[in-house]
Image (cartoon, grey):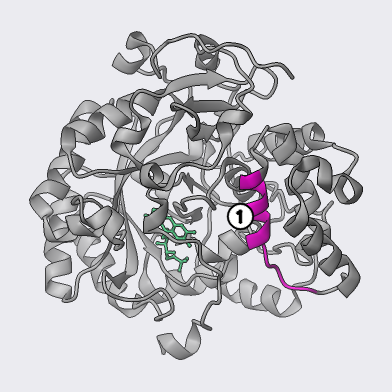
Amino acid sequence: MSRRAHSPSPPSSPRLSKRPRLEIEPLTPEDYKNGVVLAPMVRSGALPTRLYSLKHGASLVWGPETVDKAILHTQRVVDPVTGVVSYVGKSKAIFTTHPIEKPYLIYQIGSADPELAVQAAKAVVQDVAGFDLNCGCPKPFSTHSGMGAALLTNPDLLCSILTALREAMPPEISISAKIRLLPSQEETLKLVERIVNTGVNALTVHCRTRNMRKREPALIGRLREIVDFVEGMGRGIAVLENGDCEGYHDALRIRKTTGAHSVMIATAAESNPTCFSPTPLTDLETTFIPNYIRLCKYLNNHWSSTKFCTSQFKGAHVNASRADLKGMRDAIMHAKSYDDMEPRVAPWTGEEEFKKIVEAIEARDGRRGRVQVLTLTDAAESAQLSASETQSDASQTSTQSSTGDAAGLVTPPIGKPDPSVMNAPLAPANEARMPLPAMLTGDLSTPTPTPTRAVVGAASLA
Ligand SMILES: Cc1cc2nc3c(=O)[nH]c(=O)nc-3n(C[C@H](O)[C@H](O)[C@H](O)COP(=O)(O)O)c2cc1C
């Protein structure tokens, strides 16, 4: 595929940045409720992973944190074959999306400056449903410039960014924040009160404090009081739990324990993007990874990103032989390009794979087109399901149609891909979709983990 020259247009046209078209229903606090959502994850939260998360039941997906300045001065280009939209910086894509995920996509901003945050939001507003402010990243890369967890101790700045975003964005664009717990519950509640008063639609609480390490169990026991407090404020704001959720069934348990309206998953989804389903895929090397690689090739996802993400996948093993598992792992480890994966993955049926994902997303017909309803009454059923859960093979991709799903999936048609992509220059942008430079993305702030999850759950929650 030949590359077309990019025309020097801004990320979005002035007309669009003034008032984005309203081709999807706006997100309300209700859309953040009763679901399991994909967390923001630098590197690991790539477009193909977000698409599979949606296919397998994630009700909303957060994009990786992008520092405000990084998206400014990018050029928005659209791949004429796939519809993939890339915001391309000097040499690399800073952010990549597809119109099919737009109704569910929350773009996460890293910022310590209300004006820059608003500029960043305006640059991409035509491609997203909402904006989230990262107030939890504890790494020096973020905090030394006042971003991430540094905002937790600078509530005036934190709230001024949220207020600026709320005022600058049209009402149909949702605003939310993701925080960590403060050392004391009293301080946490004070901060939460201020955040809710800025007019956000949702608040995610990563149930660890800034100084807690990833391997320390999340303090989910502290969340119920926060949820009750927010509910007491009477604005209907959604509170999302984040920390140590293993998947769909675990989300039911966490919601029951904490009262949270929804649960956000990072590490477990990085390991298995089908974990949002009541029947997540196992034996990923045979059931999932080949399709993932085919999709990535079709979407022109840069091989190094695909290689990185697939090397994180670690589902349970049930049926696959050791030779199958090792063969795929070795092939990925040694592959320098998609061509090197040909013996294991061809034929390249990525386009069909993409169509299946689009169909699955479009088949969701729940409330307002977005939300998989996850009711607490499913808990008993989920316990049974967990016990009897068996492998669902690659063809059984748990698209969770509206009938017969334990979660009571109800999702509405999303509508056609956003015609606004037609306003952008057209370019395949494969080369541009390299992983982002660490200094731009905040990559340093979220080092690539090898998920070794402590067993969370009953023991630590009792
Ligand atoms: C690979 C990776 C990248 C992450 N990137 C971000 C990010 O961009 N923004 C953010 O707010 N949190 C980020 N986080 C933190 C997660 O969103 C989440 O808060 C944390 O991992 C706890 O959730 P978990 O227990 O489900 O993993 C990242 C986590 C991981 C594992």
Q: Quadrant of the N terminus?
A: top right
Residue 384 as seen in the image, left or right of residue 192: right
The crowding category of the residue bearing disc 1, from other C-alpha atoms within 10 Å (few below 14, some 14 to 19, many at least 20), is: some
Q: Which residue carries the number 1 mark?
A: 408
Q: Looking at the image, which residue sits at the far left?
A: 156
Please provide the residue range marked out in magenta.
Answer: 304-317
Is 49 one of the magenta-colored residues? no
Nearer to me, 250 or 405: 250
Instruction: Please indicate whether residue 208 sits to the left or right of residue 337 in the image.
Output: left
* Residue found at x 87% / y 69%: 320
* Residue 290 rendering spot, x and y as whole percentages: 80, 50
Give ligand 1's quarter of the image: bottom left
Q: Quadrant of the C terminus?
A: bottom left
Residue 275 x %, y %: 62, 62
Residue 393 appears in the rendering: no
Q: Residue at x 53, y 33 (%)?
A: 97
Q: Nearer the viewer, residue 397 or 12?
A: 12
Q: Depth check: 167 or 69 in front?
A: 69
Q: Position of residue 242 (x, y in %)?
A: 40, 64
Would residue 189 be found to the left or right of residue 1 on screen? Answer: left
Quarter of the image where one finds residue 203: bottom left
Q: Is residue 87 above or below residue 111?
A: above
Closer to us: 327 or 52: 327
Residue beneath the point at 57% across and 34% down:
433
- Secondary structure beneath dot 1 equals loop
